[in-house]
Image (cartoon, rainbow, N blue to C red):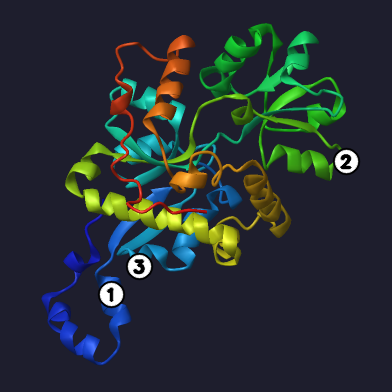
Amino acid sequence: MRHPRKNLKSSALLGMAGAVLASGLSTSLMAAELDEVVFGTNWYAQAEHGGFYQAKATGLYEKYGLDVSIEMGGPQVNGMQLLVSGKRDFSMGYAVGAVKAVEQGMPVTTVAAAFQGDPQALIAHPHITSLEQIKAEGLPVYIAAFANTTFWPWLKSKYGYTDDMIRPYTFSVAPFLADENIVQQGYLSSEPFAMEKAGVQPSVFLLADYGYPAYATTIETTDGLIEKNPDLVRRFVQASMEGWASYFKDPAPGNALIKEANPEMTDEQIAYGIAKMQEYGLVTGGDAATRGIGVMTDARWAKIHEFMLEAGLVDASLDIHDVYSLDYLPAEPVLP
């Protein structure tokens, strides 16, 4: 974590505090008191990151004494490496990846989960009506490499999928559009949007709805920051979850920052992303509906652990409680 700005200011400025406050010009002084924080996302700015951009745009981070810089992820960005090297204070993560990172000895902890379910889906043409049908017909499934250590083992275990069904996914929907017998992975608000724009109304099977247990869009930080400044961790989680509640009420401030960071993002795609998050309850459904946005539970992490053990993705010696902490969730639930 970067040092608070107040440590970088001269003693003369601090000596002027009373005069500044008395004159009503408290804004600049307040800025001097903010803790500087760097938060890294997992991809280019989009609606699925909206709560964090909203917290920045509406002053929620400042309300909690934070000056937050949001850095976008991307295909060449290793968020975990940036986090453990100290270049970022918090990183947008993924539950399965967090388990693997801790198993490999990385000093990181997951402290909140903005998404109660993973937005990953299998996408098929309209005549496909179930995950079972995909298996029964032996259809080719286009998946990216990371799927082999996340949801593909779950599909193999629960639905009997086999590795001979796999085809390499290159993040283009062109093969899908050219062949009605192709199935592919996709992000709930990304690939289906592109397919619909091309005139195909796909069948979308959100894996979370079928029992895939992983949290997504989590907040990860280092064990060192937790030890050094646990209050800062609590404040960042609190402000971020309030940002999500605000975003679904009036997303305009956050959307402006999203488009500033990612000029290729359109209003239409942002609106589609918000609609899908709400339709499927990714942020506000599940436990979040009654226990607050960002909530995590021991029971859910136990399910994640169980799935990974059964799939051979993690060694039995790992203590799942080393991966996450419930101590930094909002003291008062941030209800939708």
Q: Secondary structure at mark 2?
A: loop
The residue that disc 3 covers is 63
Q: Nearer the viewer, mark 3 or mark 1?
A: 3
- How far apart, in angstroms, are the residues tagged by discs 2 and 1? 52 Å
Q: Amino acid at mark 2?
A: Gly
Q: Amino acid at mark 3?
A: Lys
Left or right: 65 in relation to 228: right
Q: Is residue 88 visible?
A: no
Q: Secondary structure at mark 3?
A: helix
Q: Residue at x 30, y 79 (%)?
A: 28
The residue that disc 1 covers is 30
Label 2 CA crowd tier, 10 Å (few <14, some 14–19, many 20+): few
First reached walking from the N terminus: tag 3 or tag 2:
3
The residue that disc 2 covers is 199
Q: Nearer the viewer, mark 3 or mark 2?
A: 3
Left or right: 66 in relation to 141: left
